[in-house]
Amino acid sequence: MSLMERGGVRPITAVAWTSNTSTCPRDFNLISITEDGAAANFTRSFAMKSGYYLCYSKDLAGGMVVSDIQLISDKDSIPHGYCYIAEYLEPKTSVSKKKRVCVRVVPVGSVDTAVLEIKLTAKSKMMLQHYTYVGDVHGYVLWCRKGYFSSPMPQAKPRSVSLDLRRLSLEQPSAPLPLRPSNPLPPLPNNKLSQRRHSLHTKDNLDKPAESSMQGITALDGVPFSLHPKFDIHANGTTQLNSQLNNICIKSLQDIENEV
């Protein structure tokens, strides 16, 4: 993500105290020399050999920027929305509390201007062009430069190529395949299968409505019936039936019309 000021300078995202380069965080820049060439080593008194340095970061991973920086004395209360800068010091090392540096840290999208640079000078008579005087701290003068910065460019999220191609396809989606059980039943033996089919057929017949069976019943069902003795083959014999059949005269249509 690139976040640039109009002049090409990234805004400051954090300010801190550190004892030396070994205690300075990796993404921080340590200010070791002032703008007029003096060592920028802060000490509480002239008798102390060890001191501390001011450092700053421009890492934008946290999405926060320093919108303002101030110096307050130990008798003043910290302004609303401000916080004291962090300390990355060696053991048994402390920072003077007579004057303390505090910053206002806000989300990058909530402001248009932020602190772009901080500088130190050893002589208060030296002026830095385009920089704002912050205050005197332990024999040094703190300066800052504010300015506009551009909003972060949104990154394109990776998308699935297969999903995009499916949306762009002009073909109709294919019909879904029939579902199949993941654990099908084992096949039944032939004899068991035939018995099951027989039971199913019997059940189907029993489940059929009574209207289907009523269709085969006629008006003569249930009426006693017997063959006339004249046509009873067992009583008169086959010869008598044959003689009667021989006496039958078959007439044509012309014969019937002539009789009329």
Image (spheres, grey):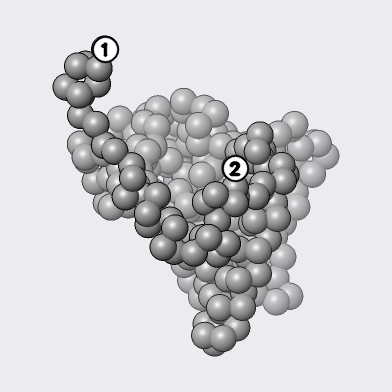
**The image quarter in which residue 104 lies:** top right
The residue mark sitting in front, 2 or 1, is 1
Q: How far apart are marks 2 and 1 (CA)?
A: 43 Å
Amino acid type at circle 1 is: Val
In this rendering, position of residue 84 left or right of residue 135: right
Q: Is residue 260 above or below residue 10?
A: above
Looking at marks 2 and 1 on the same chain, the residue that comes earlier in the sequence is marked by: 2
Dot 2 falls on a residue whose secondary structure is loop
In this rendering, position of residue 198 left or right of residue 121: right
**The image quarter in which residue 135 lies:** top right
Residue 43 visible (yes or no): no
Quadrant where the C terminus is found in the figure = top left
Q: Which residue is disc 2 drawn over?
A: 216
Image mark for residue 260: 1
Camera-side residue of 144 and 27 = 27
Camera-side residue of 145 and 128 = 145
Residue 76 visible (yes or no): yes
In percent of the image, x 59 and y 47: which residue is there?
228
Category of crowding for the residue at label 1, using alpha-carbon neighbours closer than 10 angstroms: few (below 14), some (14–19), many (at least 20)? few
